[in-house]
Amino acid sequence: MYDLIVIGGGPAGYVGAIRGAQLGKKVAVVEADKPGGTCLNWGCIPTKALLKNAEVYQTMTKKASAFGLSFDNLSYDWSKVVGRSRKVSERLAGGIGFLFKKNKVDYVPGYGSLLGSNKVEVTAADGSKQVIEGKNILVATGCKSRELPPLPHNGKSVISSKEAMVLAEQPKEMIIIGAGAIGVEFAYIYNAFGTKVTIIEMLPTLLPVEDDEVGKELQKSFTKQGVRCLTDTKCVNFKDNGTSVSIDVEGPKGNETITADTCLVAIGVQPVLPGGQQPELCERGFIKVGDRYETSLPNVYACGDISGPPWLAHTASFEAIQAVEGMFVEGHTPRHVGNFPGCTYCNPQVASVGKTERALKEEGIDYKVGKFPYAAIGKAQASANAEGFVKLLFGKEHGELLGAHIIGENATELIAEMGLALEMELTSEEIHSTIHAHPTLAEAIHEATLDADGHAIHF
């Protein structure tokens, strides 16, 4: 009998399994696809490879002259662009397999179903079944793309993010419904390679969960790049003939019909529940968990995307470690996600942690704002990536950091400093008394902190 059976091998599942093995426990992972789950095989990693391809190509086509470069007959091979992303994922999936062996975690390929509190039935690809037993079971089965009922996925004219990563032919025109992280990342990828992209969002800004100023800045940049952004716009009628899609929309500028050969539906995710006996679910169909990540079934726990938002790989891994340590480390009280970084990898990149200005107003919290543009940073000018800004929010009375919002080059790397500052409850005085190297993009954080107190030097 295993000490722990993990159903799902993604960022929650494989991390939880490895942590359990590190604690000296006998662990098995059941995974229906490949090690690494959706994130590594069909999400975070392959999209970042595609985004890098798009960034390199866009730099060559749009910014070469800024670097004194010119090209004759510059072209790309779409199949190789897609192929590189698949190779990156395959290499990393192999790496997870190596980590399983290194930590003596048993990898059991197949679809896992709960048979009560201590048994999991595994159905292999060939239909054969086996039952494995464990003292504890951790469900980490994640999510999949949510379909739009009037416009179901068909893999060709109507696609999810999974198909968007591996389309054999690049579409000439693409409609993207939903301007969350997935929507804007694919908008950037396809637009960079010349697809005519229209992105439709029913809320007032792109990336609606981000600070309003950030969403507006991204829309301004996208429009300049050639992406048509229809915000505050509703889709009211759909027509899919198998080779193209037409959508009637209502927006601030009136009604119109938009047609494209491909429509990417990026309206969120839905849970992928294990088979067999089901634990109690939340209202939206995700597994309900308690303080120790326990479900309604004895000895069955759940973490990561399957237990609800935020649907992020790094929060899933955090939850997995907390859940497993809660099972096996005496006296450990599991923590739940508090502050966490949100990152979107389009160009310009977007990253944030903590409260938005909108949230602070709604909560009636007195705050002050520090803001600094990339354009005033030498490193940004030197790299010809000077659009964007850093925006920091501090408590007015004590000066504590409440939120950080960055749009611009390397925003997704810079946000780590702000996450640490928020976790350590640092004040504006403590941040601006920390010397930031010159020339770096991180100087914008230092200057934005100074700006909150009216002391910005370089702008």
Image: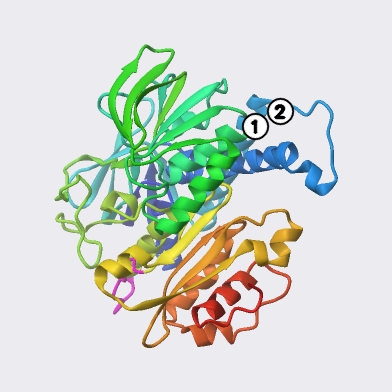
Confirm whether the magenta stretch covers residue 208: no
From the image, tell me which residue sits under label 1. 81
Quadrant for the C terminus in the image: bottom right
Position of residue 314 in the picture relative to residue 440 (left or right)? left
* Quadrant in which residue 192 is drawn: top right
Confirm whether the magenta stretch covers residue 333: yes
Above or below: residue 438 compared with residue 340: below
Q: Main secondary structure of the magenta part?
A: loop
Instruction: Classify 10 Å Cα crowding around label 2: few (below 14), some (14-19), many (20 and above).
Output: few
Counting residues from the N terminus, which is met first, the one under dot 1 or under dot 2?
2
Region in magenta? 328-338
State the residue at coordinates (58%, 51%): 348
Q: x, y percentage for residue 240?
A: 35, 16
* Quadrant in which residue 433 is drawn: bottom right
Q: x, y percentage for residue 95?
A: 57, 48
Label 2 amino acid?
Tyr
Say which of 154 and 453 sits in front.
453
Above or below: residue 189 compared with residue 369: above
Query: How many angstroms separate mark 1 from mark 2 (CA)?
Result: 8 Å
Instruction: Classify 10 Å Cα crowding around label 1: few (below 14), some (14-19), many (20 and above).
Output: some
State the residue at coordinates (37%, 44%): 30
Q: x, y percentage for residue 1?
A: 30, 54
Above or below: residue 234 compared with residue 407: above
Say which of 377 and 286 sits in front.
377
Position of residue 183 in the picture relative to residue 58 (left or right)? left
Q: Is residue 16 visible?
A: no
Element marked by disc 2: loop
Q: Is the Cβ of the residue at disc 1 closer than 8 Å to that at disc 2?
A: yes
From the image, tell me which residue sits under label 2. 76
State the residue at coordinates (76%, 59%): 382
Q: Which mark is residue 284?
A: none
